Image: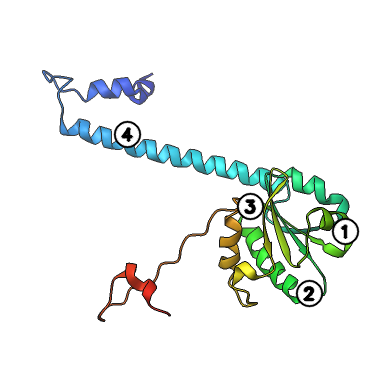
Amino acid sequence: KEKEELDDPTIVGKSKQRPGEDPESETDDSDFDEGDDALAAIRNKRISELKMKSKLNEEWLKRGHGKYQEIVEEEFLPNVTKSKHVLCHFYHKDFERCKIMDKHLQVLARKHLCARFLYINAEKCPFFVQKLQIRVLPTVICFVDGVAKDRVVGFEDLGNSDEFDTEILEERLSRSGCIPKPPKKKKPIIFGGIRDREDEDDEFNY
């Protein structure tokens, strides 16, 4: 009983009132209490967000998220409509650029559990190749709620080079809304020179 009363916030609040003190008056103690309450609210909100994220991650993993999975034509529609965000790479087994795309998508599949990452042999799914009007390989199509919303065709949007960073593809795919936009890398600040302002570094070619 005594322990319950000490844990009761109304009892604790009364115990802090000094004899003859106006309960409505502002004191340093109340300021501290308000600060503690604010910190507790922030902490509780953060805990709730982490619990929700953990629950979502578990659900996504059950649906096959977190890995780069090959499918066949018969599995295409069930997989594309099973998750809200799906990215599917149409590839050719003999095309070098398709192998490069595979390498980057494998990394992103492990990083972004919020989306399903799939790949399918274009030679073995002629119906969907024709239906989606795929003319160039590799092609990555971004689906939202089972509807094709965006596509990355070849390497045109990736600098048209085989040596692009995974972050370049990540940023491009994020425009579809299927994955979050990656944080921008901070540019180095030059000290001791004529220029040292970070916001003007764009004028230099590193």
**Which badge, 2 or 3, is on the more N-terminal residue?**
2
Disc 4 target residue: 37
The residue located at (38%, 78%) in the rendering is 204
Q: Residues under labels 1 and 3: Cα distance?
A: 29 Å
- Local SS, label 1: helix
The amino acid sitting under disc 3 is Leu
- Residue designated by label 3: 113
Label number found at residue 95: 2
Q: Earlier in the sequence, mark 2 or mark 1?
A: 2
Residue 102, horizontal then vertical, whole percent: 72, 67
Marks 4/1: CA–CA distance: 61 Å
Name the spot of residue 202 as percent of width and height, x first.
39, 72
Q: Of helix, strand and loop, which one carries label 4?
A: helix
Work out how far the residue at label 2 is from the one at label 3, CA to CA, in angstroms.
Answer: 27 Å
* Neighbourhood count class around disc 2 (C-alpha, 10 Å): few under 14, some 14–19, many 20 upward: few
Q: What residue is at 58 percent from the left and 56 percent from the top?
A: 174
Label 1 environment density (alpha carbons within 10 Å; few <14, some 14–19, many ≥20): few
Q: Looking at this view, is 44 or 123 the one in front?
A: 123
The label on residue 126 is 1
Marks 3 and 4 close (CB-CB < 8 Å): no
| Foreground pick, 78 / 57 | 78
Instruction: Determine whether the residue tagged by mark 2 lies in a helix, strand or loop.
Output: loop
